Amino acid sequence: MKIRKVTHNNRRKVFEVKIAGKVYFYPYARCEPRPEPGNKVTRTFVDRELGGEGFVYLLESGDEGVVHVEQVLEYNEDPAYLKDLFLYKLTIEARNRLQASPLSKREIIRRLGTSAAQFYRLLDPTNYRKSAGQLLSLFSVLDCEVDLVVRPRKTA
């Protein structure tokens, strides 16, 4: 995702980040170096060197910091981002289990009842068009049991 626009608000102590038509807030308290009352943000801009996926802020002291779009989405608990993160973690675990499996890739493909191309798309961590159900089928073929644990958040 690309950041379209970023502004700073020293009174509210937040950055206002526009991503895909939505405005997200990111507090100064989550930044490093942290803007302080005596060292305020003077300028913010979308960093083109990061492909528009991050922004830079400059402080009165001359220090600068960078915030990536993923930090903003994670802080705001964007549902689409959290879904993609969940699929990414499942995919990485599936790849690790595949390496440890004694089954050949051809046998796994046969047991899944899919094509080789679909199998490799399933293992691609950058492909977010797959479903958790497809990955659960793969874990089943790899002789793994998957438990989903839902618990209240830890408050800090």
Image (tube, rainbow, N blue to C red):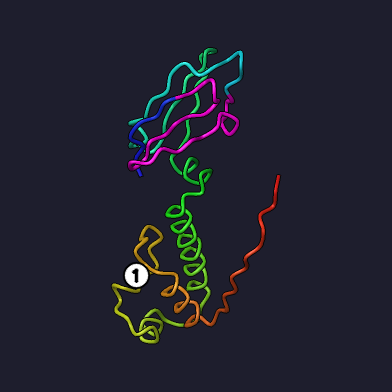
Identify which residue is drawn at 42% across, 54% down. Answer: 80
Q: Nearest the camera: 85 or 14? A: 14
Image label count: 1
Whether residue 141 is situated above or below residue 79 in the rendered picture: below
Q: Which residues are magenta?
A: 8-34
Measuring from the top left, give residue 141's x and y in whole percent.
47, 83
Q: Is residue 17 magenta?
A: yes
User: Element at badge 1?
Assistant: helix
Query: In which quadrant of the rendered view does residue 31 lie?
Result: top right
User: Residue 107 location, x and y as percent?
Assistant: 39, 85
Is residue 63 in the magenta section?
Answer: no
Q: Which of the 4 image quadrants contains residue 28? A: top right
Point 46% across, 24% down: residue: 8
Pick the quarter of the image with the C terminus. Answer: top right
Q: Nearer the viewer, residue 92 or 11?
A: 11
Question: Which amino acid lies under the numbered mark 1 shown in the image of this protein?
Answer: Tyr
Give residue 81's position: percent from left, percent from top: 44, 52
Q: Which residue position holds label 1? A: 120
Could you tell whether 11 is left or right of 5 in the image? Answer: right
Q: Residue at x 36, y 81 (%)?
A: 109
The image quarter in which residue 115 lies: bottom left
Q: Is residue 1 above or below residue 113?
A: above
The residue carrying pointer 1 sits among few (fewer than 14), some (14 to 19) or many (20 or more) residues within 10 Å by Cα, namely few
Work out whether residue 97 or residue 58 is closer to the camera in this orientation and state it: 58
For the N terminus, the image quarter is top left
* Residue 137 located left or right of residue 40: left
